[in-house]
Image (tube, rainbow, N blue to C red):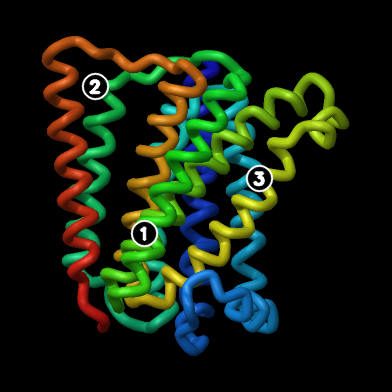
Amino acid sequence: MSSMTMAVLFGIGSAVFFAFGSALEQHAAQQEKPTRTLDPRLVLRLLHRPLWLFGWVPDAGGTVLQAVALNYGALALVEPLLLGGVFMAIPLEAALQRRRPHTRDLVVVAFGVVGLTAFLFTGDPRGGITEPSTGAWIAVGAGVGAVVSVCLLVAWRVRDAARGVALGIATGAMYGAAASLVKTLTDLFADHPLAVFGHWQLYALVVVGGAALALNQNAFQGGPIAAPLTTIALIDPVVGVIIGTTAFHERLSATGPRIVAQVAAALVMTVCIWLASTTRQR
């Protein structure tokens, strides 16, 4: 099999694992009392819930498969594949709550998948460098930090699905940044496994991953899983593509018709995020 085929297969497998883990964690998080954003007590309370802890098993599997996929393919190719897992998470959430999946949620996700697929097909992402420059990493940190800060300010002012979407955007941005760190560490690990402990990316990944975990659980408390998870699944790959093309110098096709299609696809994904923010609590 080609490297691209392997990246796609492992990326899809990662999406399935992440979807299962997200459904379990969301079900457990909604059983806890709502907390302030980034309140560590939420995670501490969830540590006492077996269902939430069990959700880490598929999460760990998804992380391993994601790392393998990134070893085979470009960041801009692998990250968008994670959106496919949203389709599984919504019916899984419904099954855990013993109800039928809401048609509106499935329609929003379907259009999101169409938009992202169109973006991938027209963008045709290809690999770049394995280690961005220090200036590129600083730019990534500043950009993601700004997005997260704005989203946190918004989340403190809104409620329910809108809060879940705001936190979902912040979580997705941090997951996209974490994926870029994973990609660098994966390349280092392949050559010299112990060398990763001497690189700052490993410790940055621990911090970013921990903060993203807390935000993710807060987002899951804001209503149906479709609102935060659709947002996370759309923002994560978009941030991954941006970081991939800027910091890692990955390439997208940029001819006239393709640019128009990419803009249209981006608008479709934006509308889907807005629709997800208007989902009502059920």
| Tag 2 residue | 122
| Tag 1 residue | 151
Q: CA distance from mark 3 to mark 2?
A: 31 Å
Q: Assess whether mark 2 and mark 3 are in contact (beta carbons under 8 angstroms).
A: no
**Which amino acid is tagged 1?**
Cys
In the rendered view, does 176 fall on the left or right side of 257? right
| Viewer-proximal residue among 202 and 5 | 202
| Element at label 1 | helix
Q: How many marks?
A: 3
- Identify the residue at image location x=33%, y=55%: 231
Q: What quarter of the picture does the N terminus occupy?
A: top right
| Viewer-proximal residue among 240 and 211 | 211
Other-residue count near label 1 (Cα within 10 Å), few / some / many at <14 / 14–19 / ≥20: some
- Residue 56 percent across, percent down from the top left: 64, 63
| Element at label 3 | helix
User: Which numbered disc flags the more N-terminal residue, 1 or 3?
Assistant: 1
Examine the image and state in which quarter residue 275 appears: bottom left
Front position among marks 3 and 2: 3
User: Which numbered disc flags the more N-terminal residue, 2 or 1?
Assistant: 2
| Viewer-proximal residue among 109 and 240 | 240
| Tag 3 residue | 205
- Residue 27 percent across, percent down from the top left: 47, 77
The numbered disc on residue 11 is none
In the displayed structure, 2 sits above or below 198; it is: above
- Residue 274 percent across, percent down from the top left: 19, 58
In the rendered view, does 180 fall on the left or right side of 90? right
